[in-house]
Amino acid sequence: MSTPQSVRFENVTKAFGAVKAVRDVSFEITAGELVTLLGPSGCGKTTTLRMIAGLELATAGTIFIGERNVTALPATSRDVAMVFQSYALFPHMNVLDNVAYGLTVSGIKKRDAHAQALEALALVGLADYGKRLPSELSGGQQQRVAVARAVVLEPEVLLFDEPLSNLDAKLRRHVREEVRELQQKLGITAVYVTHDQEEALAVSDRIIVMNDAIIAQIGTPRDLYELPASRFVANFIGDANLAEAQIVQVDGERAHVNAAGLQLDLRARGLKQGNALLAIRPRAIQLHAEAKPDAAEVTIDKAAYLGSHVEYELKTPLGDLFAIDPHVDRPLAAGDKAWMELAVRGVTLVPEG
């Protein structure tokens, strides 16, 4: 396996005519790290991935893989491999030949290429599937073949372009765990593109959230979920409720916050006294059927039982809120009155409202 390399963007822009798909983007991915580019459609994440691969060339700025400036190099001159959304397997070739294909076209003898391909198939749990055609495999198995075909090239950087989007939800969870385990086992640098927030949170060391061609925030999954830096990130990661509140007093790094009568002690996050924006995670809303001191009275607008939890839409003094309640043994019904408290965990001030 090649030595994993870092990836660095310095003020990179990519324009298609008058449209800037990526604008002045800078970041660094350390060697051996799995970083996900996450964002809504059209945010620039796939264009960024394609610039790492050399499938698109930057209009401005500099791209490094390790210490090598690859900005102007085509894909064939970069030591990267990509796993595509469509798998891109050759239907007339068996699995072993599919995995060995990149090696054979580079001049490696067929016997040696097949030996390396078998090793790669063993890594993804498909050592006994070499003689099968892609059409004889499930979607998850085809995706693992695509991963093996990329890994066998021993790239410095492994790229994933929406690799699980063609799988059903249950299989997607299983395959993403396999991808993460393989990346950690190999210690390879990986860049992963998805629009699925749960997928990004599950597989990543860090996440680069993009919006409107720029970076909105970079951080660990926990940082992004618990400490979003803007209204967009708070709303995009984890379905936060956004509500107006007032910072009554700041004492060092703590802020005393009044949220429609609910009193909260939160991290100040550099904010001062005055109006502020709260991000409230659905599971941070605690509902009680009986009145409680210092709780806010709310009305259940809608209720949906989902087996492991109940989802509520609420009418509250803070506006319409969405709540997730694990107490399925005592569900509330639409039209019921309830009393709401906010847990400290799952509620945060948002610096850029």
Image (cartoon, grey):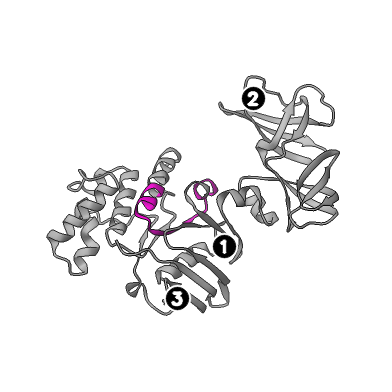
Asked if 213 appears above or below 131 in the picture, the reply is below
Q: Earlier in the sequence, mark 3 or mark 2?
A: 3
Camera-nearest residue between 342 and 268: 268
Residue 291: give x, y in percent of width and height. 82, 24
As drawn, 67 above or below 233 = below
Residue 184 among magenta residues: yes
Q: What residue type is labelled 2?
A: His
Tell me the element at label 3. Answer: loop
Give how far across and how far down residue 103 sits, in percent: 22, 64
Residue occupying the point 44% across, 68% down: 52
Q: Position of residue 279 (x, y in %)?
A: 71, 47
Task: Judge depth for marks 2 and 1 and give the one in front.
Answer: 2
Query: What are the residue bounds of the magenta stretch?
Result: 180-200
User: Which residue position holds label 3?
Assistant: 57
Marks 1 and 3 sit apart, C-alpha to C-alpha, by 18 Å
Q: Name the residue under label 2.
A: 327
Q: Which residue occupies 76% across, 52% down?
A: 253
Crowding around mark 2 (Cα neighbors within 10 Å: few <14, some 14 to 19, many 20+) is: few
Kindly identify which residue carries mark 1: 43
Residue type, mark 1 in image: Cys
Alpha carbon of mark 2 to alpha carbon of mark 1: how far? 38 Å
Whether residue 203 appears in this view of the structure is: yes
Q: Which residue is drawn at 73% across and 58% down?
A: 352
| Image quarter of residue 55 | bottom left
Work out which quarter of the rendered image holds the C terminus and state it. bottom right
Compute the Cα span from label 3 to label 2.
53 Å
